[in-house]
Image (cartoon, coloured by chain):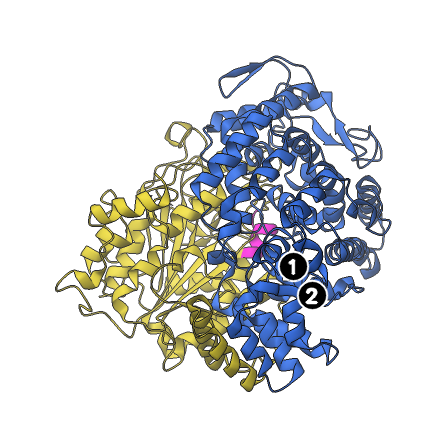
């Protein structure tokens, strides 16, 4: 068994399922690239989930009922929270069922990567109810296409708009903005820079990408009006398909805008789309994406040649992501530095499911495990997403929690599997002699399993 | 400059020198009894709500619906002096202030002058003059002479993962409550053996085991609860660590949720609730520390402040200067330290934010030098490189 098979399965994939290393070993590079070029098998796998616009409409309805209720008893107050929680559990379960079972784990890792790059955080309502739907609707269909299309799909998704408050942002010279100013009630209406700032800082150029505070403010004006349909049941903001992206001319800042040294005279929603396409083409974006991919797949401090190579592939291909992934897979650095990455809790949980060929069936348990390990699904706490370095995940206490968790998993796994054989199956050539010896000398099957799962071999990728 | 080059540059400039290589500085009268708690409030706390300048003639006008009633009125500010009042949700801190054990430094900011949370926190924690200027944390560099060792760390992160301010060459530990059953001792012993030749794992396991010893059983306190309950629990355990015979004496805690872009509220509401949770948590720390409180300084800091004016969504956006609170028996309190820039439009930073007139590094230097007895040379050279513009703030600590 080649070390390349273990690298393909663990570094690029989500950890091997029993028997998978044999398939990969035939041609590890090709095993990865085929996942990119075919269609997504995972897209069809999640159980039938509702659309995000349906869910947004549903939770807004519950919210209104709560507001209008004469008797605000516990049932009414709790219903909102309960409905959101139900969706969150259902979507979390679907995500980890796909990750545990998929035969395109490289592709699925990319879904998780991009979902984290374009992070929304489920600590702000009603994001928990739509975070998984956002991932399936905006991220999943676009990860092998052009970055600009992915970017636009993300920034126009209702989850992103709601998360960064863009539906509240009102152009000062828009029809409604002027009306409000005349009434001197400008406390109620104004520009909100959140989405504009995060697009520049976190989604495209990066913080050192060469933009100013003025660019942020101007860009915020450009995307005023990017909103959601049916925000009220009547009157202002009622129009549009409920819960779906809606461009509202009445709050859009009219006129030409100058941003990053370029003038944008387009009207309506198109102005923002043209800016996004230009941002996607920007060399700072190429470099930012290249370093994030290098950090995720190769090393916490990504080797400069990798970043250079990915960034130039990005620019030469005009942001074609498949070409960038191919350059990544073809990077010798990816194959010569085995196991440089300390797994994130998400990686650890998914690779453990895969190692046991386990199909999770209870979403609450999946969320609970990830919470204990410090990575609740879609809840990084900020639009910067989860960290991607051992410095950030490698606290002493965090390691101790991993040990407790793997020990609990080992107890649940019982005596069904021989841990030495499992180590050979899932780690292949990456199963070190030292770990193998420790596992084989364990005093029980269960202890051997804990040692295997808590070993540096399994905790790194 | 990439990271490697930057490190080389620091070395070449003599900034990467460790304190033990500076003759006469190592272990120079380092205090061993004092305790330091650093609380990082992530998300940018509104300093004008924390300690409101009710005596500034422009305060009510610029703050509009977010202005807090003057001291003595219903839901009024808790009076600090003729100019400033503490938010009404902070009665415990106000008692400390009246006892001379708490002070406010106002119009303070890190050297960072942009408005990204993540970069702002980076600069607050790295101690350098800008983002990425230094790769590790100032508090980690500061503990170099304090003589901690593996299993006997001087500092603890009260979190599963160590925040930047405590990351670096000096060994620190971390702890957070667990809801899982312990692994068997024999399994842990075998893991120690398995990890022995892998420094990353070996170090962390050793640290974690020591922390488990000190924290002891969780009792009924393992449930996370809401943010306020969790912060209170963490303060209780912080006190337990800081009072343990061979425990750490520096602790770092974090609390999020301060990014009040919408519906911030004034005397009541979202921010008031958070502040109330903070005040309760500090009470838990105070009572948990017992006698040790007398030798403790607590610094409560945030990455930057918020806009002076209310935004379109009844909140405030990312701003510049803010307020920092110090409390504890060692603090020379009962006063507000501020070179007040004023709230008139012409006095605002970029016509939107409170203008910084003090550097947070000056506050940190004052605490490290006078509370932990750390040598000035260390503070100037390696803890806060390029910080000559931020001289040590004097008399923050009782002499």
Closer to the N terminus: mark 2 or mark 1? 1
Q: Is mark 2 on a helix, strand or loop?
A: helix
Counting from the top left corner in percent of width and height, residue A69 is at 85, 50
Can residue B267 be found in the magenta stretch?
yes
Q: Is residue A20 left or right of residue A262?
A: right
State left or right for residue B52 relative to residue A442: left
Is residue B162 shown above or below A80?
below
Q: Where is residue A141 in the image (x, y as percent from the top left)?
A: 74, 38
Q: In this view, does A147 lie to the left or right of A210?
A: right
Magenta stretch contains residue A39: no
Residues at circles 2 and 1 in contact by the CB criterion of under 8 Å: yes
Magenta-tinted stretch:
B266-274
Residue beneath the point at 57% across and 73% down? A403
The chain painted blue is: A
Q: Which chain carries label 1?
A: A
Position of residue A13 relative to residue A179, above or below, is: below
Examine the rendered structure and indicate whether residue A197 appears above or below residue B16: above
Q: Determine which residue is flagged by label 1.
A: A15
Horizontal and vertical percent position of residue B359? 32, 45
Query: Quarter of the image holding residue A347?
Result: bottom right
- Gap in angstroms between the C-alphas marked 2 and 1: 7 Å
Q: Which of B155 and A64 is in front in this view?
A: B155
Which shade is chain B? yellow
- Front in this rendered view, residue B283 or B145: B145
Determine which quarter of the picture holds residue B178.
bottom right
């Amino acid at each position: 068994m080649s070390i390349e098979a273990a690298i393909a399965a663990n570094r690029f994939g989500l950890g091997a399922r029993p028997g998978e290393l044999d398939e990969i070993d035939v041609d590890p590079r090709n095993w990865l690239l085929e996942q990119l070029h075919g269609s997504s098998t995972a897209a069809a796998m999640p159980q039938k989930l509702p659309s995000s616009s349906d869910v947004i409409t549903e939770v807004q309805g519950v919210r209104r009922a709560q507001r209008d209720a004469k008797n605000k008893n516990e049932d009414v107050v709790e219903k909102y929270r309960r409905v959101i929680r139900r969706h969150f559990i259902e979507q979390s379960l679907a995500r980890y069922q796909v990750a545990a079972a998929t035969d395109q784990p490289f592709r699925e890792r990319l879904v998780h990567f991009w979902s984290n790059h374009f992070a929304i955080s489920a600590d702000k309502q009603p994001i928990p109810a739509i975070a998984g739907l956002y991932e399936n609707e905006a991220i999943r269909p676009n990860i092998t296409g052009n970055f600009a299309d992915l970017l636009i799909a993300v920034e126009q998704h209702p989850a992103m708009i709601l998360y960064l408050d863009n539906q509240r942002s009102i152009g000062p010279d828009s029809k409604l903005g002027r009306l409000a100013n005349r009434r001197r009630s400008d406390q109620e209406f104004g520009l909100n820079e959140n989405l504009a700032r995060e697009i520049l800082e976190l989604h495209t150029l990066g913080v050192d990408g060469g933009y100013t505070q003025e660019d942020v403010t101007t860009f915020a004006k450009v995307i005023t009006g990017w909103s959601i349909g049916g925000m009220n049941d009547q009157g202002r903001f009622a129009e549009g398909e409920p819960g779906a992206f809606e461009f509202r001319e009445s709050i859009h800042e009219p006129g030409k805008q100058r941003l990053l040294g370029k003038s944008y005279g387009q009207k309506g929603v198109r102005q923002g789309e043209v800016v996004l396409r230009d941002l996607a083409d920007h060399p700072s974006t190429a470099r930012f994406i290249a370093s994030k991919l290098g950090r995720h797949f190769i090393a916490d401090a990504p080797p400069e040649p990798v970043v250079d190579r990915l960034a130039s592939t990005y620019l030469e291909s005009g942001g074609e992501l498949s070409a960038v992934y191919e350059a990544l897979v073809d990077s010798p650095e990816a194959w010569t530095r085995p196991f440089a990455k300390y797994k994130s809790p998400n990686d650890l949980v998914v690779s453990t499911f895969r190692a046991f060929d386990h199909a999770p069936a209870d979403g609450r348990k999946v969320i609970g495990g990830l919470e204990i390990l410090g990575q609740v699904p879609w809840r990084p706490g900020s639009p910067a997403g989860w960290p991607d370095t051992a410095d950030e995940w490698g606290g002493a206490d965090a390691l101790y929690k991993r040990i407790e968790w793997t020990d609990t998993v080992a107890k649940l796994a019982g005596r069904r599997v021989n841990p030495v054989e499992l180590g050979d199956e899932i780690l292949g050539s990456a199963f070190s002699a030292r770990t193998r010896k420790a596992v084989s000398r364990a005093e029980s099957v269960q202890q051997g399993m804990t040692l295997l799962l808590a070993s540096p071999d399994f905790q790194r990728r | 400059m990439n990271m490697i080059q930057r490190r080389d540059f620091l070395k070449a400039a003599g900034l990467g020198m460790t304190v033990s290589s500076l003759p006469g500085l190592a272990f120079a009268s380092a205090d061993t009894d004092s305790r330091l708690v650093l609380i990082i409030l992530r998300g940018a706390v509104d300093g004008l709500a924390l300690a409101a300048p009710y005596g500034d003639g422009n305060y009510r006008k610029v703050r509009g619906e977010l202005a807090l009633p003057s001291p003595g009125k219903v839901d009024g500010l808790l009076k600090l002096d003729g100019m400033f009042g503490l938010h009404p949700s902070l009665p415990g801190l106000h008692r400390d202030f009246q006892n001379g054990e708490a002070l406010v430094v106002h119009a303070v900011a890190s050297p960072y002058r942009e408005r990204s949370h993540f970069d702002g926190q980076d600069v607050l924690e790295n101690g350098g003059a800008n983002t990425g200027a230094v790769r590790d944390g100032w508090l980690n560099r500061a503990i170099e002479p304090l003589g901690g060792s593996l299993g006997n760390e001087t500092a603890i992160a009260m979190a599963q993962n160590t925040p930047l301010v405590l990351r670096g060459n000096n060994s620190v530990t971390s702890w957070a409550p667990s809801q899982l059953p312990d692994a068997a001792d024999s399994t842990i012993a075998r893991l120690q053996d398995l990890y022995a030749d892998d420094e990353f794992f070996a170090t962390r396991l050793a640290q974690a085991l020591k922390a488990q010893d000190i924290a002891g059983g969780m009792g009924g306190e393992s449930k996370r609860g809401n943010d306020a309950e969790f912060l209170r629990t963490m303060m209780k355990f912080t006190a337990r660590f800081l009072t343990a015979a061979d425990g750490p004496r520096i602790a770092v805690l974090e609390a999020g949720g301060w990014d009040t872009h919408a519906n911030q509220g004034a005397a009541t509401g979202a921010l008031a609730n958070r502040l109330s949770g903070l005040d309760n948590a500090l009470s838990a720390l105070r009572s948990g520390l017992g006698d040790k409180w007398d030798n403790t300084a607590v610094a409560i800091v945030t990455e930057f402040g918020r806009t002076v004016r209310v935004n379109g969504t009844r909140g405030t956006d990312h701003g510049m200067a803010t307020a920092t609170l110090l409390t504890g028996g060692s603090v020379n309190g009962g006063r507000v330290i501020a070179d007040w820039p004023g709230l008139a439009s012409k006095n605002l930073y970029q016509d939107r934010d409170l203008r910084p007139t003090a550097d947070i590094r000056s506050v940190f230097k004052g605490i490290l030098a006078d509370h932990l007895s750390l040598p000035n040379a260390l503070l100037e050279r390696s803890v806060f490189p390029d910080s000559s513009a931020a001289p040590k703030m004097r008399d923050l600590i009782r002499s």
